[in-house]
Image (cartoon, helix red, strand yellow):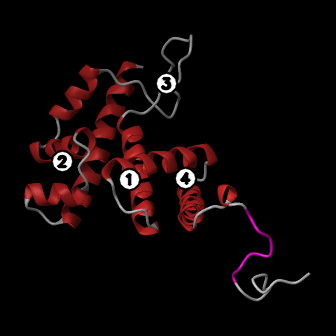
């Protein structure tokens, strides 16, 4: 029994599906968008669980803002969320909880006291102390230090290297005196 609306080459279905069981084109498009969003999140994070969290949070943000449900907007939201989470983790590094006390320094990691470090820093030139402070404590890049001090970046790189080397030498000399 052949009916005219049951064409194989057309878009009409071969089987009559009741309206209550039909999916709308919007639902199919949304499923496709979510699959693409998950694949994108997985390509960025390499972790399936984290990818699901990123996708869910991105969907929440988009729906709260009433934003457009298209791939470009979803991908940008996922990427921004990933950057936000990585920055948050970088700001507060996790330390494992152990029942042990403070760990002993390794041979490659001498145990300098605050007084030793302060004494060694006092022996450096003020410009070197400033650069070390900006780089180590304030976490400025060499380009940012160059902007702040008005010196070329190359000069900052070489001066910072010399200041670190001098500080290391001063601290190693102090360690040798204690032995």
- The part of the chain drawn in magenta is 11-17
Q: Nearer the viewer, mark 2 or mark 1?
A: 1
| Drawn side of residue 4 relative to residue 156, left or right | right
- Secondary element at image label 2: helix
Q: Which mark is residue 83?
A: none
Alpha carbon separation for disc pair 4 and 3: 34 Å
Quarter of the rendering containing residue 125: top left
Q: Give SS at disc 3.
A: loop
What residue is pinned by disc 4?
A: 45
Q: Is residue 77 above or below residue 48?
A: below
Which of the two marks, 4 or 3, is nearer to us in this view?
4
Element marked by disc 4: helix
For mark 1, what is the residue? 62
In the image, residue 62 sits, relative to residue 92, either above or below, namely below
Residue that sits furthest to the right in the current view = 1
Q: Residue at x 56, y 60 (%)?
A: 27
């Amino acid at each position: 029994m052949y009916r005219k609306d049951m064409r194989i080459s057309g878009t009409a279905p071969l089987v009559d599906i009741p309206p209550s069981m039909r999916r709308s084109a919007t639902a199919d498009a949304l499923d496709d968008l979510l699959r693409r969003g998950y694949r994108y999140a997985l390509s960025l994070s390499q972790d399936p669980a984290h990818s699901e969290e990123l996708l869910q949070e991105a969907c929440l943000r988009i729906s709260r803002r009433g934003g457009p449900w298209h791939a470009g907007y979803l991908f940008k939201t996922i990427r921004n969320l990933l950057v936000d989470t990585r920055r948050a983790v970088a700001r507060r590094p996790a330390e494992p909880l152990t029942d042990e006390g403070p760990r002993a320094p390794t041979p490659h990691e001498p145990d300098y006291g605050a007084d030793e470090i302060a004494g060694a820093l006092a022996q450096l030139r003020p410009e070197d102390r400033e650069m070390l402070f900006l780089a180590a404590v304030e976490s400025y890049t060499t380009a940012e230090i160059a902007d702040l001090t008005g010196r070329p970046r190359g000069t900052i790189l070489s001066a910072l290297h010399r200041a670190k080397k001098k500080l290391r030498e001063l601290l190693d000399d102090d360690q040798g005196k204690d032995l």
